[in-house]
Image (cartoon, rainbow, N blue to C red):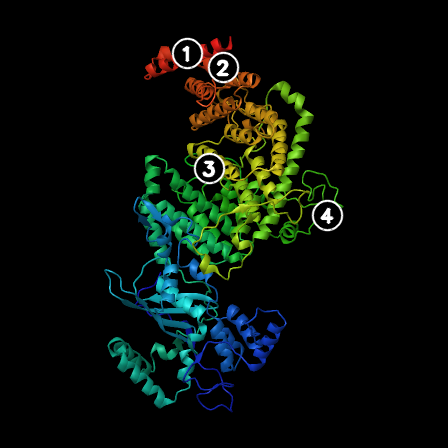
């Protein structure tokens, strides 16, 4: 990220001298001494402080052999001022600033931690994906990736190596400017090089960097890292001077003339033309330079109007994103873009304003991608991976505009950008190539019910529509503020049992909001570095969902006879939570799982941060007790599992469009994959039983209810996971769940479209038609997998095999899948390590007979193989019969 070497560091502000006391001689500030030789950055020490530290060590409060000097009041005050105030404000606020005070403010103004240096110098601080690290990876013989070598090529690691090798020299701090040289050791093909590095800083942030290495990258080069870490780790070895304007002020006329002439002599080839030009302008009374009071000083710190943010090379960000997009998904460009998004999230978590700034630059390049217009003109869809990048872009903007502590002018600026991008014709739609004409659902609550009418009138929702709507949301609701602020917010005397009551029967707070929007708040809190606040809100949301479950069950039971008699149902959720653009269930699950994660950071601080960079920790999840708002025996882990089961079991409409349907399937499989990593114990098995019983009895609110809508998302994948999880603990419930999920109503032409008398009936949104399910082949294969799993588990159980066979013959329409099940049953029945199972062979024979005529009529290509399989099946079956009798 280093800038071009010939660019001089920008002058921060104009400096002029305030008044001095009458008792001060020219060239000396009040309370100060001469500045000729400079001073070291080491903190103050005294005999009294050392004696106090020794006394503390003697009492056993410090380890033996270690002492700690207490900070002086000067250092405490200077540190706080250096964090918050630009130095110009300090000068304007106080007429006379003693030199020791200036020194301590300058000393404390440099960044004190290495985490930010690491964040701005490497793509991946965790080395979770070495292949994505800048500079590629090292491949060992046999194609094995050497992750250690890849990690060592990260600029942050290289900077540490340069520092440890003693390659940093000539370090000098003049005011708010740090300079030094970093020697790059000679390599096999390259000679030794010396890089000149300059760093400007303000209020504990690096504001500009310059390095002569010519490196062009988004992040800081290794030489900038080495110099920065030198200043952080070895401050006592850095000679510190006050800003150069202070030194010049101490000189008389002869000294100033000598200073300028020596400077020109040493650097006459570089500065002589500039020096003569400045001299001519100064001697001209009407020149512009004489109209300005004071003169610029690049070492004098920031002015009041300067924005306080870390240095980010905007040009390089734009160039890199443009390059990655131009590669069209090849050479790992999609992985690099995902790493950029991860870097934005990392900045947001550090509450760094560059997060929104960087995302704006990325979005501008995405909108300028020429392929968008090409795809729109040709009527072709963008690739799936590219589409997922757009989804992440929209989700990040949702997090940014929901920052609970952003200023109103910031939100107005973001809204202006979002509306501009949203109005572009080629802006991608939220659900792929199909427009979604559903009403505005993000603001379906009182605080946003009448907002954003312009956006709701648009025929299609783009990837930015939800972020635009979220700009009207706020955090000022007193109930919401109490929820996220404390675990002590309860009302045990609250007896309001209405649908929108603020507390449940336990007195615990509830949060009634459009579920994806409420979960977007949780994601925003997590993204902006408020994990405890996010956790409290997540618990309130899950408690609300559980209460709604109970209410829905009671409502269905009161109308059960009527609905079962009609044989119709409706879908109460117009948006499914799994596969939703805001991923509400995934957000709640991740938030709760983070709270019960046990790793090294839970027990150790960040003092050894650089030693842990790049080390992949093995994560372990435990039943850590919640602070409050959970029943006895419950934990964050049980809550995470339960909310995942609630979301996966929700009856929801299959969306329109290939991409939206694929996303539903993909997100369902991803969530189940995460659940499979959790080892089930007795506590979790109870949660499974509780939720499965509810799903089986909850009617239209469940995808496993007795009557489901024709176009609701099938439950085959979810039921297979439930079946395998429950089978060792409750076989009866496992089979009941799997058999209920075997249905595939969308293929039944006689299925009713629903009850139009219902206020939330899906027919009011989706017209009665034969639906276009682009993922139907995948769904049928999942149905086949569920049936095969039940057949294998029921081996030797005649009653259950008959029940499974009946379900297969009733629900599976594909002859190829039925034949596959016949082959699977035959394979399981004739395993080499056991005797053939005649009951399973009979099932295989019946399934095969069901489709055999079709194979004969259609003359399938592998007819000979099919005939051989039939012969083998018949032989095995006859042998089993002969052995039985």
Residue ID for mark 3? 459
Q: CA distance from mark 1 to mark 2?
A: 12 Å
Q: CA distance from mark 3 to mark 2?
A: 60 Å
Q: Earlier in the sequence, mark 1 or mark 4?
A: 4
Q: Which mark is residue 875?
A: 1
Q: Residues within 10 Å of mark 2 (few under 14, many from 20)?
A: many
Per the image, the residue denoted by label 2 is 838
Q: Earlier in the sequence, mark 1 or mark 2?
A: 2
Tell me how far mark 2 sits from mark 4, CA to CA. 63 Å
Query: SS for tag 1?
Result: helix
Question: Residue at 42% across / 14% down in the picture?
Answer: 873
Given this view, does label 1 or label 3 mark the residue nearer the observer?
Answer: 1
Image quarter in which the N terminus is found? bottom left
Residue denoted by label 4: 491
Q: Are marks 1 and 3 in contact (CB under 8 Å)?
A: no
Compared to 61, does 371 lie above or below? above
| Image coordinates for residue 421, horizontal then vertical, percent | 42, 47
- Please report contact status of discs 3 and 2: CB closer than 8 Å, yes or no: no
Residue 772 visible in this rendered orientation of the protein:
no
> Residue 250, percent across and down?
42, 86
- Judge by depth and name the residue closer to the eye, 591 or 472: 591
User: Residue 703 appears at what percent x and percent y?
Assistant: 56, 29
Which is in the foreground here, disc 3 or disc 4? 4
Q: Is residue 167 above or below residue 49?
A: above
Q: Which mark is in front, 3 or 2?
A: 2
Marks 2 and 4, the one that precedes in the sequence = 4
Q: Earlier in the sequence, mark 3 or mark 2?
A: 3
Which residue is rendered at x = 35% and y = 34% of the image?
379
- Measured in 3D between alpha carbons, the distance from the residue under mark 1 to the one under mark 3, in whole angstroms, is 64 Å
């Amino acid at each position: 990220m280093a800038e071009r070497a010939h660019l001089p560091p920008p002058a921060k502000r104009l400096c002029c001298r305030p008044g001095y006391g009458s008792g001060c001689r020219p060239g000396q500030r009040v309370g100060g001494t001469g500045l000729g030789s400079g001073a070291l950055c080491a903190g103050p020490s005294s005999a009294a402080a050392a004696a106090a530290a020794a006394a503390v060590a003697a009492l056993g409060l410090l380890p033996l052999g270690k002492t700690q000097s207490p900070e002086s009041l000067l250092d405490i005050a200077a540190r706080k001022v250096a964090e918050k105030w630009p130095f110009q404000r300090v000068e304007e606020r106080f007429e006379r600033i003693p030199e020791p005070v200036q020194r301590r403010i300058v000393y404390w103004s440099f960044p004190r931690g290495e985490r930010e240096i690491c964040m701005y110098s490497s793509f991946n601080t965790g080395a979770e994906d070495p292949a994505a690290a800048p500079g590629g990876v090292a491949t060992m013989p046999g194609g094995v990736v050497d992750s250690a070598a890849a990690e060592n090529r990260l600029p942050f690691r290289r900077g540490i190596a340069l520092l440890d090798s003693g390659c940093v020299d000539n370090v000098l701090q003049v005011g708010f400017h740090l300079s030094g040289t970093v020697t790059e050791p000679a390599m096999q093909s390259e000679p030794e090089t010396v890089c000149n590095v300059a760093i400007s800083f303000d209020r504990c942030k690096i504001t500009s960097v310059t390095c002569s290495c010519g490196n062009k990258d988004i992040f800081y080069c290794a030489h900038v890292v080495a110099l920065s870490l030198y200043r952080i780790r070895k401050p006592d070895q850095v000679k510190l001077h006050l800003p150069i304007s202070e030194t010049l002020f101490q000189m008389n006329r002869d000294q100033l003339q000598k200073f300028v002439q020596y400077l020109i002599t040493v650097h006459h080839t570089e500065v002589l033309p500039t020096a003569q030009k400045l001299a001519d302008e100064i001697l001209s009374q009407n020149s512009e330079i004489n109209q300005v009071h004071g003169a610029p000083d690049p070492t004098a710190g920031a002015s009041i109007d300067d924005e306080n943010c870390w240095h980010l090379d905007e040009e390089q960000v734009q160039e890199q994103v443009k390059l990655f997009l131009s590669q069209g998904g090849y050479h790992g460009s999609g992985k690099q873009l995902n790493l950029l998004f991860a870097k934005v999230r990392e900045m947001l978590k550090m509450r760094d304003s560059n997060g929104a700034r960087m995302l704006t630059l990325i979005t501008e390049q995405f909108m300028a991608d020429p392929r968008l217009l090409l795809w729109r003109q040709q009527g072709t869809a963008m690739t799936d991976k590219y589409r997922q990048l757009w989804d992440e872009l929209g989700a990040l903007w949702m997090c940014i505009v929901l920052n609970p502590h952003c200023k109103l002018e910031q939100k107005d600026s973001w809204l202006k950008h979002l509306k501009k991008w949203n109005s572009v014709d080629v802006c991608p739609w939220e659900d792929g190539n199909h427009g979604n004409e559903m009403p505005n659902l993000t603001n379906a609550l009182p605080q946003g019910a009448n907002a954003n009418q312009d956006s709701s009138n648009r025929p299609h929702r783009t990837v930015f529509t939800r972020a635009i709507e979220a700009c009207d949301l706020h955090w000022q609701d007193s109930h919401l503020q109490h929820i996220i602020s404390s675990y002590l917010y309860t009302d045990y005397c609250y007896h309001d049992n209405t649908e929108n009551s603020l507390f449940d029967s336990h007195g615990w707070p509830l949060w009634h909001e459009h579920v994806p929007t409420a979960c977007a708040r949780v994601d925003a809190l997590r993204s902006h570095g408020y994990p405890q606040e996010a956790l409290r809100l997540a618990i309130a949301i899950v408690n609300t969902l559980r209460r709604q479950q109970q209410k829905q069950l009671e409502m269905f039971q009161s109308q059960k006879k009527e609905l079962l008699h009609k044989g119709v149902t409706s879908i109460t959720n117009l948006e499914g939570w799994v596969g939703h653009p805001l991923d509400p269930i995934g957000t709640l699950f991740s938030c709760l799982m983070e709270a019960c994660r046990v790793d090294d950071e839970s027990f150790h601080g960040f003092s050894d941060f650089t030693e842990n960079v790049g080390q992949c920790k093995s994560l372990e999840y435990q039943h850590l007790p919640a602070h409050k708002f959970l029943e006895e025996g419950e934990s964050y882990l049980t809550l995470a599992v339960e909310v995942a089961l609630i979301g996966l079991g929700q009856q929801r409409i299959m969306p329109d469009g290939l991409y939206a349907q694929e996303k539903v399937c993909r997100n369902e499989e991803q969530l189940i994959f995460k659940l499979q990593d959790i080892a089930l114990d007795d506590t979790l098995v109870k949660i499974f039983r509780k939720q499965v019983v509810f799903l089986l009895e909850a009617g239209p609110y469940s995808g496993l209810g007795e009557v489901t809508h024709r176009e609701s998302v099938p439950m085959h994948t979810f039921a297979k996971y439930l079946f395998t999880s429950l089978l060792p603990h409750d076989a009866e419930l496992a089979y009941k769940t799997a058999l209920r999920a075997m249905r595939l109503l969308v293929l039944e032409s006689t299925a009713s479209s629903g009850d139009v008398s219902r206020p939330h009936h899906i027919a009011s949104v989706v017209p009665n038609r034969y639906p276009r399910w682009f993922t139907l082949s995948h769904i049928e294969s999942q149905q086949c997998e569920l049936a095969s799993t039940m057949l294998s588990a029921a081996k030797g159980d005649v009653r259950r095999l008959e029940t499974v066979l009946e379900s297969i013959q009733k629900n599976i329409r594909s002859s190829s899948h039925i034949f596959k099940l016949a082959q699977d049953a035959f394979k399981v029945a004739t395993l080499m390590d056991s005797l053939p199972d005649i009951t399973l062979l009979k099932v295989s024979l019946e399934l095969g007979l069901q489709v055999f005529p079709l194979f004969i009529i259609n003359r399938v290509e592998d007819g000979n193989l099919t005939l051989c399989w039939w012969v083998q099946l018949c032989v095995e079956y006859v042998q089993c019969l002969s052995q039985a009798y």
